[in-house]
Amino acid sequence: MSVAGLTERLFYRIARRWIAGYTIDDAVKAAQDANGKKILAIINRLGEHTPDRKLIDAYFEEYLRLIEVIKNDKIQGTISVKPSQMGLALEAPLFKSLIFKVLEKTEDEGLFLWIDMENSPYTDATVDTYREMLASHKSVGICLQSNLKRTENDIRDLLPRGGKIRLVKGAYPENREIAYKHGKDVNANFTRLMDLLFDQGEFFAIATHDGKLINAAKALSHDHKADFEFQLLKGIRDDLKPGLVADGFRVSEYIPYGPEWYNYSKRRMRERKRNILLFLRSVTG
Ligand SMILES: Cc1cc2nc3c(=O)[nH]c(=O)nc-3n(C[C@H](O)[C@H](O)[C@H](O)COP(=O)(O)OP(=O)(O)OC[C@H]3O[C@@H](n4cnc5c(N)ncnc54)[C@H](O)[C@@H]3O)c2cc1C
Protein backbone atom coordinates (compact mmCIF):
# COMPACT_ATOMS: atom_id res chain seq x y z
CA MET A 1 0.00 0.00 0.00
CA SER A 2 1.27 3.53 -0.84
CA VAL A 3 2.17 5.97 1.95
CA ALA A 4 -0.83 8.12 0.94
CA GLY A 5 -3.13 5.08 1.11
CA LEU A 6 -1.78 4.06 4.50
CA THR A 7 -2.09 7.60 5.88
CA GLU A 8 -5.69 7.75 4.67
CA ARG A 9 -6.45 4.42 6.34
CA LEU A 10 -4.98 5.61 9.62
CA PHE A 11 -6.86 8.90 9.35
CA TYR A 12 -10.11 7.01 8.72
CA ARG A 13 -9.56 5.08 11.96
CA ILE A 14 -9.54 8.40 13.82
CA ALA A 15 -12.31 9.93 11.68
CA ARG A 16 -14.61 6.97 12.38
CA ARG A 17 -15.61 8.52 15.72
CA TRP A 18 -17.04 11.59 13.93
CA ILE A 19 -18.88 9.88 11.08
CA ALA A 20 -21.42 7.05 10.98
CA GLY A 21 -19.80 5.21 8.05
CA TYR A 22 -20.32 5.07 4.30
CA THR A 23 -24.00 4.23 3.80
CA ILE A 24 -27.55 5.20 4.75
CA ASP A 25 -27.69 1.98 6.82
CA ASP A 26 -24.67 3.16 8.81
CA ALA A 27 -26.36 6.51 9.39
CA VAL A 28 -29.59 4.83 10.51
CA LYS A 29 -27.70 2.68 12.98
CA ALA A 30 -25.92 5.72 14.45
CA ALA A 31 -29.25 7.57 14.62
CA GLN A 32 -30.89 4.63 16.41
CA ASP A 33 -27.99 4.58 18.89
CA ALA A 34 -28.57 8.29 19.56
CA ASN A 35 -32.34 7.80 19.87
CA GLY A 36 -31.68 4.98 22.37
CA LYS A 37 -30.02 7.63 24.54
CA LYS A 38 -33.00 10.00 24.09
CA ILE A 39 -30.96 12.11 21.67
CA LEU A 40 -32.47 13.25 18.36
CA ALA A 41 -30.51 12.66 15.17
CA ILE A 42 -29.63 15.19 12.47
CA ILE A 43 -28.32 13.16 9.54
CA ASN A 44 -26.04 14.73 6.95
CA ARG A 45 -24.92 13.07 3.72
CA LEU A 46 -21.31 14.20 3.36
CA GLY A 47 -20.26 15.96 0.16
CA GLU A 48 -19.68 19.62 -0.66
CA HIS A 49 -18.37 22.10 -3.24
CA THR A 50 -19.73 19.99 -6.07
CA PRO A 51 -19.99 21.58 -9.55
CA ASP A 52 -20.70 18.16 -11.16
CA ARG A 53 -24.34 18.04 -12.21
CA LYS A 54 -24.57 14.23 -12.12
CA LEU A 55 -23.19 14.13 -8.60
CA ILE A 56 -25.53 16.93 -7.48
CA ASP A 57 -28.50 14.95 -8.81
CA ALA A 58 -27.24 11.84 -7.02
CA TYR A 59 -26.95 13.74 -3.71
CA PHE A 60 -30.44 15.16 -4.23
CA GLU A 61 -31.93 11.69 -4.90
CA GLU A 62 -30.13 10.26 -1.90
CA TYR A 63 -31.58 12.95 0.38
CA LEU A 64 -35.08 12.12 -0.85
CA ARG A 65 -34.39 8.44 -0.07
CA LEU A 66 -32.92 9.34 3.31
CA ILE A 67 -36.03 11.32 4.25
CA GLU A 68 -38.18 8.26 3.48
CA VAL A 69 -35.89 5.99 5.49
CA ILE A 70 -36.04 8.36 8.48
CA LYS A 71 -39.81 8.30 8.25
CA ASN A 72 -40.20 4.54 7.65
CA ASP A 73 -37.67 3.49 10.28
CA LYS A 74 -39.27 5.91 12.77
CA ILE A 75 -35.99 7.70 13.44
CA GLN A 76 -36.46 10.59 15.85
CA GLY A 77 -34.71 13.30 13.94
CA THR A 78 -34.19 14.83 10.57
CA ILE A 79 -31.62 15.95 7.97
CA SER A 80 -29.18 18.80 7.45
CA VAL A 81 -28.00 19.73 3.96
CA LYS A 82 -24.99 21.65 2.63
CA PRO A 83 -25.89 24.19 -0.10
CA SER A 84 -22.75 23.56 -2.17
CA GLN A 85 -23.73 19.91 -2.40
CA MET A 86 -27.20 20.83 -3.67
CA GLY A 87 -26.00 22.86 -6.66
CA LEU A 88 -24.76 26.15 -5.15
CA ALA A 89 -21.21 25.44 -6.34
CA LEU A 90 -22.60 25.24 -9.89
CA GLU A 91 -25.35 27.87 -10.06
CA ALA A 92 -27.64 29.54 -7.52
CA PRO A 93 -30.95 28.88 -9.37
CA LEU A 94 -30.23 25.13 -9.40
CA PHE A 95 -29.58 25.21 -5.64
CA LYS A 96 -32.80 27.10 -5.07
CA SER A 97 -34.87 24.67 -7.10
CA LEU A 98 -33.36 21.53 -5.47
CA ILE A 99 -33.44 22.76 -1.88
CA PHE A 100 -37.08 23.84 -2.25
CA LYS A 101 -37.88 20.30 -3.46
CA VAL A 102 -36.04 18.81 -0.47
CA LEU A 103 -38.02 21.14 1.81
CA GLU A 104 -41.33 20.07 0.25
CA LYS A 105 -40.36 16.44 0.83
CA THR A 106 -39.37 17.00 4.47
CA GLU A 107 -42.62 18.90 5.02
CA ASP A 108 -44.67 16.11 3.39
CA GLU A 109 -43.08 13.65 5.80
CA GLY A 110 -43.54 15.92 8.82
CA LEU A 111 -39.81 16.54 9.24
CA PHE A 112 -37.79 19.70 9.80
CA LEU A 113 -35.06 20.76 7.36
CA TRP A 114 -31.78 22.25 8.57
CA ILE A 115 -29.57 24.10 6.10
CA ASP A 116 -25.86 24.09 6.94
CA MET A 117 -23.78 27.22 6.42
CA GLU A 118 -20.53 26.94 4.51
CA ASN A 119 -17.70 29.38 3.79
CA SER A 120 -18.41 33.04 3.05
CA PRO A 121 -18.66 32.93 -0.79
CA TYR A 122 -21.89 30.97 -0.23
CA THR A 123 -23.39 33.03 2.61
CA ASP A 124 -25.40 35.58 0.61
CA ALA A 125 -27.07 33.01 -1.65
CA THR A 126 -27.80 30.69 1.27
CA VAL A 127 -29.37 33.43 3.42
CA ASP A 128 -31.31 34.85 0.45
CA THR A 129 -32.79 31.45 -0.39
CA TYR A 130 -33.65 30.87 3.26
CA ARG A 131 -35.40 34.25 3.44
CA GLU A 132 -37.45 33.25 0.40
CA MET A 133 -38.37 29.93 2.01
CA LEU A 134 -39.67 31.69 5.12
CA ALA A 135 -42.33 33.46 3.07
CA SER A 136 -44.20 30.17 2.63
CA HIS A 137 -42.59 27.54 4.90
CA LYS A 138 -42.13 27.14 8.63
CA SER A 139 -40.28 23.87 9.23
CA VAL A 140 -36.87 24.99 8.09
CA GLY A 141 -33.83 26.37 9.89
CA ILE A 142 -30.47 27.81 8.93
CA CYS A 143 -27.05 27.67 10.51
CA LEU A 144 -25.36 31.03 11.23
CA GLN A 145 -21.79 31.54 12.45
CA SER A 146 -20.64 33.76 15.31
CA ASN A 147 -17.21 34.26 13.70
CA LEU A 148 -18.85 36.31 10.92
CA LYS A 149 -19.39 40.02 11.63
CA ARG A 150 -22.57 40.07 9.50
CA THR A 151 -24.39 37.43 11.58
CA GLU A 152 -26.11 39.81 14.02
CA ASN A 153 -27.69 41.63 11.08
CA ASP A 154 -28.74 38.33 9.52
CA ILE A 155 -30.37 37.21 12.77
CA ARG A 156 -32.15 40.56 13.24
CA ASP A 157 -33.43 40.32 9.67
CA LEU A 158 -34.53 36.67 9.88
CA LEU A 159 -36.16 36.46 13.33
CA PRO A 160 -39.15 38.71 12.52
CA ARG A 161 -39.74 36.55 9.42
CA GLY A 162 -39.98 33.42 11.60
CA GLY A 163 -36.33 32.41 11.11
CA LYS A 164 -35.07 29.40 13.05
CA ILE A 165 -31.38 29.65 13.73
CA ARG A 166 -28.72 27.10 14.60
CA LEU A 167 -25.95 29.16 16.18
CA VAL A 168 -22.36 27.86 15.76
CA LYS A 169 -18.91 29.41 16.06
CA GLY A 170 -18.05 28.68 12.41
CA ALA A 171 -15.86 25.96 10.96
CA TYR A 172 -14.25 27.78 8.01
CA PRO A 173 -11.19 30.06 7.98
CA GLU A 174 -12.30 33.56 6.90
CA ASN A 175 -10.41 36.83 6.49
CA ARG A 176 -10.35 39.59 9.09
CA GLU A 177 -12.42 42.03 7.00
CA ILE A 178 -15.50 39.90 7.49
CA ALA A 179 -14.70 37.66 10.44
CA TYR A 180 -13.53 37.71 14.04
CA LYS A 181 -10.20 35.92 14.12
CA HIS A 182 -9.62 35.50 17.86
CA GLY A 183 -11.42 32.84 19.85
CA LYS A 184 -12.38 35.33 22.55
CA ASP A 185 -14.09 37.63 20.01
CA VAL A 186 -15.90 34.69 18.39
CA ASN A 187 -17.07 33.59 21.85
CA ALA A 188 -18.14 37.12 22.85
CA ASN A 189 -20.18 37.40 19.68
CA PHE A 190 -21.67 33.93 20.30
CA THR A 191 -22.77 35.13 23.75
CA ARG A 192 -24.32 38.32 22.32
CA LEU A 193 -26.15 36.37 19.61
CA MET A 194 -27.32 33.75 22.07
CA ASP A 195 -28.83 36.54 24.24
CA LEU A 196 -30.64 37.80 21.15
CA LEU A 197 -31.99 34.33 20.36
CA PHE A 198 -33.19 33.75 23.93
CA ASP A 199 -34.87 37.18 23.83
CA GLN A 200 -36.52 36.99 20.42
CA GLY A 201 -36.09 33.49 18.92
CA GLU A 202 -39.13 31.34 18.17
CA PHE A 203 -37.17 28.10 17.96
CA PHE A 204 -33.40 27.88 17.79
CA ALA A 205 -30.41 25.62 18.41
CA ILE A 206 -27.28 26.25 20.45
CA ALA A 207 -24.71 24.15 18.60
CA THR A 208 -21.44 24.08 20.50
CA HIS A 209 -19.33 21.80 22.67
CA ASP A 210 -18.00 24.76 24.64
CA GLY A 211 -18.86 24.04 28.28
CA LYS A 212 -18.91 27.76 29.23
CA LEU A 213 -21.35 28.65 26.43
CA ILE A 214 -23.53 25.63 27.21
CA ASN A 215 -23.69 26.71 30.86
CA ALA A 216 -24.54 30.26 29.78
CA ALA A 217 -27.38 28.87 27.64
CA LYS A 218 -28.62 26.78 30.57
CA ALA A 219 -28.65 29.90 32.76
CA LEU A 220 -30.52 31.90 30.11
CA SER A 221 -33.08 29.11 29.80
CA HIS A 222 -34.03 29.59 33.46
CA ASP A 223 -35.10 33.19 32.82
CA HIS A 224 -36.66 32.74 29.36
CA LYS A 225 -39.43 30.43 28.19
CA ALA A 226 -37.44 29.63 25.08
CA ASP A 227 -38.09 26.77 22.66
CA PHE A 228 -34.56 25.62 21.88
CA GLU A 229 -32.30 22.59 21.72
CA PHE A 230 -28.65 21.83 22.18
CA GLN A 231 -26.94 20.35 19.15
CA LEU A 232 -23.60 18.56 19.26
CA LEU A 233 -21.60 16.62 16.72
CA LYS A 234 -21.30 12.85 16.72
CA GLY A 235 -18.23 11.72 18.63
CA ILE A 236 -17.49 15.06 20.32
CA ARG A 237 -18.07 15.74 24.04
CA ASP A 238 -20.06 12.51 24.44
CA ASP A 239 -19.52 13.01 28.17
CA LEU A 240 -21.76 16.11 28.11
CA LYS A 241 -24.74 14.67 26.25
CA PRO A 242 -26.34 12.39 28.89
CA GLY A 243 -26.22 15.18 31.50
CA LEU A 244 -28.05 17.60 29.21
CA VAL A 245 -30.72 14.95 28.51
CA ALA A 246 -31.02 14.16 32.22
CA ASP A 247 -31.48 17.88 32.95
CA GLY A 248 -34.51 17.83 30.63
CA PHE A 249 -32.99 19.65 27.64
CA ARG A 250 -33.72 18.59 24.08
CA VAL A 251 -30.47 17.39 22.52
CA SER A 252 -29.69 16.57 18.89
CA GLU A 253 -26.62 14.86 17.52
CA TYR A 254 -25.38 15.78 14.04
CA ILE A 255 -24.49 12.53 12.30
CA PRO A 256 -22.60 12.70 8.97
CA TYR A 257 -22.09 9.71 6.70
CA GLY A 258 -20.79 8.99 3.23
CA PRO A 259 -17.53 8.28 1.43
CA GLU A 260 -16.64 11.99 1.37
CA TRP A 261 -15.50 11.94 5.00
CA TYR A 262 -12.09 13.51 4.43
CA ASN A 263 -12.84 17.29 4.39
CA TYR A 264 -15.32 17.03 7.24
CA SER A 265 -12.84 15.07 9.36
CA LYS A 266 -10.03 17.51 8.53
CA ARG A 267 -12.14 20.31 10.03
CA ARG A 268 -12.76 18.25 13.19
CA MET A 269 -9.05 17.43 13.35
CA ARG A 270 -8.09 21.12 13.09
CA GLU A 271 -10.40 22.13 15.91
CA ARG A 272 -8.34 20.49 18.57
CA LYS A 273 -4.57 20.04 18.94
CA ARG A 274 -5.13 16.81 20.85
CA ASN A 275 -6.79 15.27 17.75
CA ILE A 276 -3.65 15.96 15.72
CA LEU A 277 -1.52 14.34 18.42
CA LEU A 278 -3.85 11.34 18.38
CA PHE A 279 -3.36 11.05 14.65
CA LEU A 280 0.44 11.41 14.84
CA ARG A 281 0.53 8.76 17.55
CA SER A 282 -1.45 6.37 15.35
CA VAL A 283 0.99 6.99 12.47
CA THR A 284 4.11 6.51 14.58
CA GLY A 285 2.59 3.57 16.46
C1 LIG B 1 -24.72 20.39 15.39
C2 LIG B 1 -23.64 21.22 14.78
C3 LIG B 1 -23.80 21.67 13.48
C4 LIG B 1 -22.81 22.47 12.90
N1 LIG B 1 -23.02 23.00 11.66
C5 LIG B 1 -22.12 23.87 11.16
C6 LIG B 1 -22.36 24.55 9.92
O1 LIG B 1 -23.37 24.35 9.27
N2 LIG B 1 -21.42 25.45 9.51
C7 LIG B 1 -20.28 25.71 10.22
O2 LIG B 1 -19.48 26.56 9.81
N3 LIG B 1 -20.02 25.04 11.36
C8 LIG B 1 -20.90 24.15 11.85
N4 LIG B 1 -20.63 23.51 13.02
C9 LIG B 1 -19.23 23.52 13.56
C10 LIG B 1 -18.94 24.72 14.42
O3 LIG B 1 -18.91 25.89 13.66
C11 LIG B 1 -17.57 24.55 15.13
O4 LIG B 1 -16.58 24.45 14.16
C12 LIG B 1 -17.49 23.33 16.03
O5 LIG B 1 -18.69 23.10 16.70
C13 LIG B 1 -16.39 23.52 17.10
O6 LIG B 1 -16.66 24.64 17.85
P1 LIG B 1 -17.25 24.62 19.36
O7 LIG B 1 -18.40 25.54 19.41
O8 LIG B 1 -17.52 23.25 19.78
O9 LIG B 1 -16.13 25.32 20.22
P2 LIG B 1 -14.57 25.03 20.38
O10 LIG B 1 -14.04 26.21 21.11
O11 LIG B 1 -13.94 24.66 19.09
O12 LIG B 1 -14.56 23.76 21.30
C14 LIG B 1 -15.04 23.78 22.64
C15 LIG B 1 -14.66 22.46 23.29
O13 LIG B 1 -15.33 21.40 22.62
C16 LIG B 1 -14.49 20.28 22.43
N5 LIG B 1 -14.24 20.09 20.98
C17 LIG B 1 -14.57 20.95 19.99
N6 LIG B 1 -14.23 20.44 18.79
C18 LIG B 1 -13.65 19.25 19.04
C19 LIG B 1 -13.09 18.25 18.22
N7 LIG B 1 -13.06 18.37 16.89
N8 LIG B 1 -12.59 17.13 18.82
C20 LIG B 1 -12.62 16.98 20.15
N9 LIG B 1 -13.16 17.92 20.99
C21 LIG B 1 -13.65 19.03 20.44
C22 LIG B 1 -13.23 20.59 23.18
O14 LIG B 1 -13.39 20.13 24.51
C23 LIG B 1 -13.18 22.10 23.16
O15 LIG B 1 -12.44 22.65 24.20
C24 LIG B 1 -21.61 22.74 13.63
C25 LIG B 1 -21.47 22.29 14.93
C26 LIG B 1 -22.45 21.55 15.51
C27 LIG B 1 -22.28 21.11 16.93
Image (tube, helix red, strand yellow):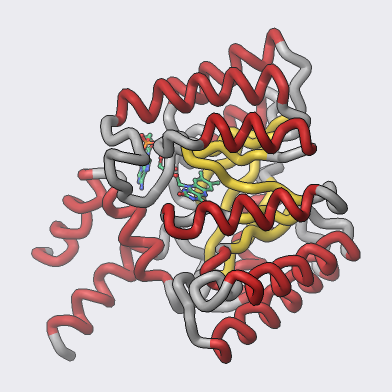
Task: State left or right for residue 270 relative to residue 253.
Answer: left
Residue 176, placed above or below residue 48? above
Residue displayed at 70% across by 8% down: 223
User: x%, y% of residue 257?
Assistant: 53, 69
Residue 190, placed above or below residue 279? above
User: x%, y% of residue 2?
Assistant: 15, 88
Residue displayed at 50% across by 39% down: 168
Ligand 1 occupies quarter: top left
Residue displayed at 47% across by 56% down: 118
User: x%, y% of residue 259?
Assistant: 46, 78
Residue 199, placed above or below residue 251? above
Residue 201, placed above or below residue 83? above
Q: Is residue 26 visible?
A: no
> 131 or 16, which lies in front?
131
Using the rendered view, name the quadrant where residue 230 is placed: top right
> 6 or 230, which lies in front?
230
Where's the C terminus, which quadrant?
bottom left
Q: Is residue 189 visible?
A: yes
State how many labels appear. Answer: 0
